[in-house]
Image (tube, grey):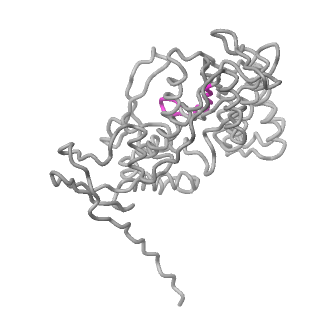
Amino acid sequence: MADVFRHFGPAFRDQHGGSLSRAQRHAMAAIESCRTAALGGHVERCGDCGHQRVSFNSCRNRNCPKCQGLARAQWLVDRQAELLDVPYFHVVFTVPAAIEVIAFQNQTVVYDILFRAASETLRVIAADPEHLGAEIGFPGVLHTWGQALTHHPHLHFLVPGGGIAPDGKSWMPGRPGFFLPVQVLSCLFRGLFLHYLDKAFVAGELNFFPAHRHLHEPAAFQRYLAPVHTTKWVVFAKRPFAGPAQVLDYVGRYTHRVAISNNRLVSMDDGEVRFRWKDYRDDNRQKTMTLPPEEFIRRFLIHVLPDGFHRIRYFGFLGNCHRARKLALCRELLGMAPAGPATDPPADYRDGFQALTGQSLRECPHCHTGMMVVIDCITRPKVCQPVPDTS
């Protein structure tokens, strides 16, 4: 991805720089400079065979395909420690194409509504005595892309098959192999989402670009949304075949990166970018897509979220303000052993990486017996600012 930005990024910025957000410009610059001399680094030497290597610093941008591996591993460990001895369900909420258009032009507002409507749907239906009658807790992760990098916002939740009884004195299990009725979830989700979207419109929180500028008019906005009031909104709920850890691993692939991994990129020859993708509509066949670099970069940048936006959120008894207390209660009600004491992560990222992944960053890649020792540092080059003309 960095090579694509280095080769084609300057021309893309020249042509589209005025329409790029701050987060998109920052992401491009960070990915271009990631693990290059522009960010500094250090020189290491093996204490046994004398092999040397130069390691440049990473950009740590959350959109970079090379970075965030350690953050992802830590997230998985933390979430696995919160799993309860109950069945779990993988629940996905998707919006219709007409909503995707509005979301594309109002990311912060509409993605917040998506989180709010979907999480409220799960909690309300689960709390209904006709269904479960309990308080549930679950993490949610926002994905905004499909395999072809097109705009496709949807939410993934990992939800336990049960919850805390209203009196807080027992665990209410769900029906074996069954979560909640998806038809009921779909109807409530549609109603809540459209309610909150209408409130945002009335409050003047939605903006529309030229092709849809007419939607600023209330009558046009209502006519545009009329079909989605009656169409079926997709809610998918399935019990993980191999257990909740499988879904955690699946969702974890996308929690700390954006859109596409480097291993899916095939080439960028002849002024075109080629990448592998899975066509779900054609029996999940693996295919290769070829795009002009301008279109490839455009599709990638669609999925760079606004600064400060949280793509991972927690709800119910996993809410941040009472997670530890309520998880302890869940464990007690289920007869599980109390959670072990929390440990501080190692001060050195290399120790943390080895503890989480079992792979050593200090082992010599040449002899595999010696340890790499830092022998020199590479400082970041100073950027000279132009001196203003005061004459």
Residue visible at 82% across and 32% down in the picture: 195
Residue visible at 38% across and 49% down in the picture: 350
Residue 164 versus residue 71 in the image, above or below: above
Which stretch is magenta? 146-158
Direction from residue 382 to residue 217 in the image, left or right = right
Question: Whole-percent x and y of residue 116?
Answer: 73, 35
**Residue 182, visible in the rendered structure:** no
Direction from residue 275 to residue 219 in the image, left or right = right
Please identify the quarter of the rendering in which residue 367 is found.
top left
Residue 305 versus residue 113 in the image, above or below: below
Is 312 included in the stretch rendered in magenta? no
Residue 37 versus residue 120 in the image, above or below: below
Residue visible at 49% across and 46% down in the picture: 63
Query: In this view of the protein, which residue sits in the foreground, 60 or 369?
Result: 369
Query: In this view of the protein, which residue sits in the foreground, 341 or 120?
Result: 341
Question: Whole-percent x and y of residue 304?
Answer: 55, 45
**Residue 32, visible in the rendered structure:** yes
Question: Whole-percent x and y of residue 314?
Answer: 66, 36
Direction from residue 116 to residue 258 in the image, left or right = left
Residue visible at 40% across and 72% down in the picture: 382
For the N terminus, give its image quadrant.
top left
Please identify the quarter of the rendering in which residue 310 is found.
top right
Q: Which residue is situated farthest in the bottom direction here? A: 391
Is 149 included in the stretch rendered in magenta? yes
